[in-house]
Image (cartoon, grey):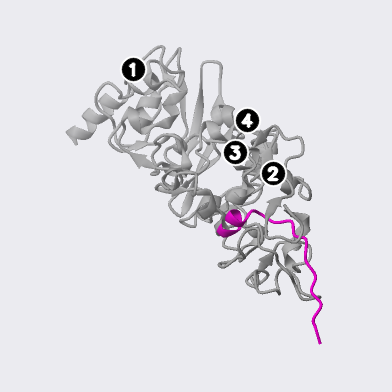
Amino acid sequence: MLRRYRTIRLNALSTSLLLVFGVFTAPPVSGQEIGLVPGQSCLSAGCHEDLGQKNVVHMPAASGTTCVFCHAASEPGRHEFKLAAQGSKLCAGCHNVLGDKRNQHMPVKMGMCTMCHEPHQSDNRKLLKARPVSKLCFGCHSESAFQDKVTHGPVEEGSCTGCHEPHASDHARLIKAAMPELCFECHNRNLRDADGKSLSAAKKTFDDETLTKHMPFGIGQCAMCHAPHASPNHRLLNAPYPAEFYTSYSEDKYFCFGCHDAGAFAAPRTLTATEFRNGDLNLHFRHVNRDKGRTCRACHDHHAAENPKLIRDSVPFGNRFISITNFELTASGGQCGPTCHALVKYDRLEAEENALKVSPRQGEDASFEEPERLRQEQMK
């Protein structure tokens, strides 16, 4: 009994393009007439049997009977094919990836969807060519730019699309939302860093209108201080800042001096460089500029605080907290009573006398009463 054959009309990539994607290894010769037994498809006819075998199969390629969604025969009944449309226009027949977004990812803008996606099947979700997503991104973007001493959690996990849109966005650098909303997608709850240290919910602090806010944080510009991907510095800062509570002083250790005047820490006595002084005794210098100086965080919060000047109520110190109590500002000075020492007062116009129970200082940064105390102790 003779079998009845029928010719098929296929819309397909050119033979050369099919070879690039590895769709088949031994295609019919271009222009050769092809025939199929009734009921057979592109997948079952012995040409493209390897399609439809992976975890994720593009819907038009799933059955072998809907190839015409993307491929068109140059001449009916012959193995000569062309795409039904060129570049991203073909994909846009089904997928709306651009909308009216202002910024487009370069491969999308150039119609090069297959730089990232397999056209027929893949072992990865979204028909991606590689996983994790970062491996795919590093095909174009330098991996070294995302590796450093401190790495942002999403980058460490290879989750580029946690922050960036892969196709198009209204925001620069294809980020999914403007700052700080983007950051608050994760930092709206307590987190832990790579060392297990607690990171408080920044959004809760940001939303609290009773707090005094650090300017960059208050206007939601997180990137003014923090690198989004990786950094050699503590807490992903854009420049150095000591990770320790105590450190010897040098100007180049402090990222803060990008905005704040380092002169406030340069001289033991001054009448102009800082308002935090007792008479002309520079209390910033006294706290920070020494072999075992306190870092800025000993007194100031980096995001927001209940007190003026970002003075914190408490500061982590090892496994406990140091309290900062009785802080108060006056027109020409103030007072402070932290765990470190008893309540002390300071005044820029008329220096206060404080009976500090600490080792007396020598030199220009000694308080007015300390030289006498030191002399008496030496006479004992």
Residue 243 percent across, percent down from the top left: 40, 43
Q: How many marks?
A: 4
Q: Which residue lies most toward the bottom here?
A: 1
Q: Secondary structure at mark 2?
A: loop
Q: Nearer the viewer, mark 4 or mark 2?
A: 2
The numbered mark at residue 86 is: 2
Q: Is residue 311 visible?
A: no
Task: Looking at this view, name the residue that lies furthest to the front.
Answer: 2
Per the image, label 1 sits on a secondary structure element best described as loop
Give amino acid for label 2: Gln
Q: Distance between the Cα atoms at labels 1 and 3? A: 57 Å
Helix, strand or loop status at disc 4: helix
In magenta, the rendered stretch is 1-19
Indicate which label's residue lies in the foreground, 3 or 2: 2
Q: Nearer the viewer, residue 102 or 85?
A: 85
- Is disc 4 surrounded by few (<14), some (14 to 19) or many (20+) residues within 10 Å? some
Of labels 1 and 2, the one closer to you: 2
The mark lying in front, picked from 1 and 4, is 4
Give the residue number, with chain letter if any, for mark 1.
269
Residues at badges 1 and 2 in contact (C-beta under 8 Å)? no
- Residue highlighted by disc 4: 218
Is disc 1 in contact with disc 3, using a CB cutoff of under 8 Å?
no
In this view, the residue farthest toward the left is 379
Magenta span: helix, strand or loop, mainly?
A: loop
The reply to whether the C-beta atoms of the residues labelled 1 and 4 are less than 8 Å apart is no
Q: Earlier in the sequence, mark 3 or mark 2?
A: 2
Give yes or no for residue 6 being in the magenta stretch: yes
Q: Is residue 321 magenta?
A: no
List the residue tagged with mark 3: 106
Measured in 3D between alpha carbons, the distance from the residue under mark 1 to the one under mark 4, in whole angstroms, is 32 Å
Disc 3 from disc 4: Cα separation: 34 Å
Amino acid on which disc 4 is placed: Gly
